[in-house]
Image (cartoon, rainbow, N blue to C red):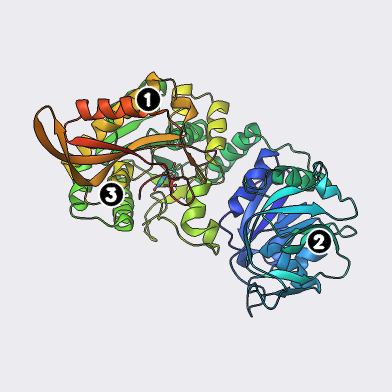
Amino acid sequence: MSNAHDRLLIIDFGSQVTQLIARRLRELNVYCEIHPYQSVTDAFLKDFAPRAIIFSGGPDSVTREGSPRPPAAAYAMGVPILGICYGQQVMMQDLGGRVEGGKITGGGGTAEFGRAYVTPGADRLDLLDGWFDQGREQVWMSHGDHVAEIAPGFRVFGTSPNAPYAIIADTARQFYAVQFHPEVHHTPKGAKLYANFVKIAGFKGDWTMGAYREEAIAKIREQVGDKRVICGLSGGVDSSVAAVLIHEAIGDQLTCVFVDHGMLRQDEAEQVVTMFRDNYNIPLIHADESELFLTALEGVTDPEVKRKTIGRLFIDVFQKYADQVEGAEFLAQGTLYPDVIESVSFTGGPSVTIKSHHNVGGLPEKMGLKLVEPLRELFKDEVRALGRELGLPQAFIGRHPFPGPGLAIRCPGEITREKLAILRQADAVFIDQIRRHGLYDEIWQAFVAILPVKTVGVMGDGRTYDFACALRAVTSVDGMTADYYPFTHDFLGETATRIINEVTGINRVTYDITSKPPGTIEWE
Ligand code: XMP
């Protein structure tokens, strides 16, 4: 995006956690980009001119013919390289070492998944400054294959019981490689390792939100020229920040469209319209298309079909309104980095689809509008930082994220108007409880899911046969991983009582105590 900063290139070999590498680097104010290995050609490398390169992990095996490789030119650039997991194996294979498959073959190497402890080698390594104060460090291993023989010039600086080459380096060439994943939270001192790496590479750490804002504005102006842009506003943090950023870049060339797909929360549509009209002078079209969406979703129970249906209609609706805005050629969206990664692995990279995200799922190839996605490279907390940088009210910035498909993915099974009405009320009570107890800002996201099951209860002297619901509340840094929130039993009891008393149609309340992974935050 910019040549003004030193850039770090992450070559993606398809690990599910590649984006966390970028996350750790951004925290260090280092500008980096992730590119799938297929697109990293010699010409690309020359043009990108990275100050350092990281090889990500990946699901493939370097022992397989035709497995992913970096271009040979990467090793000849004279810049520091850090290989992680598959990235380590690829580096060893390329530079004259040897990698073996992971199955236990008579005592040699083994596959290794989960927590492990690394102990230091005999010599000190600049990459490991601050490591091994207590003798050993916890790391997160997740590999099938392993390095059986290291390449010439490399030495060992750390070992774990199952990974004799857990940390290796060729200090002359500044090539470093680790078998574990320093980017995940389960490697507590992983961030320090990245800090050391970028220091070795000479990064100044000057990539800030202020810089991002200026560059994003310049880029929007360049992309859009004097054409008009339509921006989908959801009232959430992402689209709000995107709208304000674009408005700052091109002023009244921007028209916002707020699509009410009938699966918003209680009073949400009204709040969004009022907030935007009061706070900003951005032209806003309020498109109530709930009938269209709810009719199309009748009888649909499959989560992916729901997502794709909503995504497709959303685009149709946009086109309809775009046609009313004369000269509109662009559609702006608050698509975030994790949306992009989980759907297609950044620009067609190799990782597996978890969910078709609303923002990118079902987007027709030959849509009449070009996309402006100024937040595409940011994580959620970075969007909040950008929002503050742009002077958005805390009320916008502090809002819990709300997914594009809305309540549809909090209503497993068939979506009916009746269930949505019940869900809205229960959700409002839950959020009210959280606010009353002063917990809103401690929680990343909280909501109710209405379950596709009715249960028997007793109220007063009568039998009830109503829906069960689940409360969901999680803490998270970026939505990529999450822990359930540890409410007190008093809080949960009080909330259950309130929901059952105040919401007709629900007679049983459960609390979802699944973390992510293995669960996801939303139910679908
Ligand atoms: P999951 O359920 O994948 O959610 O753990 C992670 C975060 O993403 C949000 N989410 C979405 N946001 N469009 C969005 O704009 C979507 O299709 C979508 N699906 C999930 C979710 O609310 C959570 O913050």
- Which tag, 1 or 2, sits closer to the chain's start? 2
- The image's mark for residue 490 is 1
Q: Is mark 3 within 8 Å of ligand 1?
A: no
Q: Alpha carbon of mark 1 to alpha carbon of mark 2: how far?
A: 61 Å
Compared with 376, 245 (above or below) is above
Label 1 or label 2, whichever lies nearer to me, is 1
Q: Which residue is label 3 attached to?
A: 412
Q: Quick one: label 3, few (<14), some, or many (20+) residues within 10 Å?
A: some
Q: Judge from the rendering whether residue 133 lies leftward or rightward of residue 442; answer left or right.
A: right
- Which tag, 1 or 3, sits closer to the chain's start? 3
Q: In this orientation, which residue lies closer to the viewer: 290 or 103?
A: 103
Q: Which residue is label 2 attached to?
A: 77
- Say if mark 1 contacts mark 3, CB within 8 Å: no
Q: Quick one: label 2, few (<14), some, or many (20+) residues within 10 Å?
A: some
Residue type at tag 1: Asp
- Say if mark 2 contacts mark 3, CB within 8 Å: no
Compared with 499, 410 (above or below) is below
Residue type at tag 2: Met
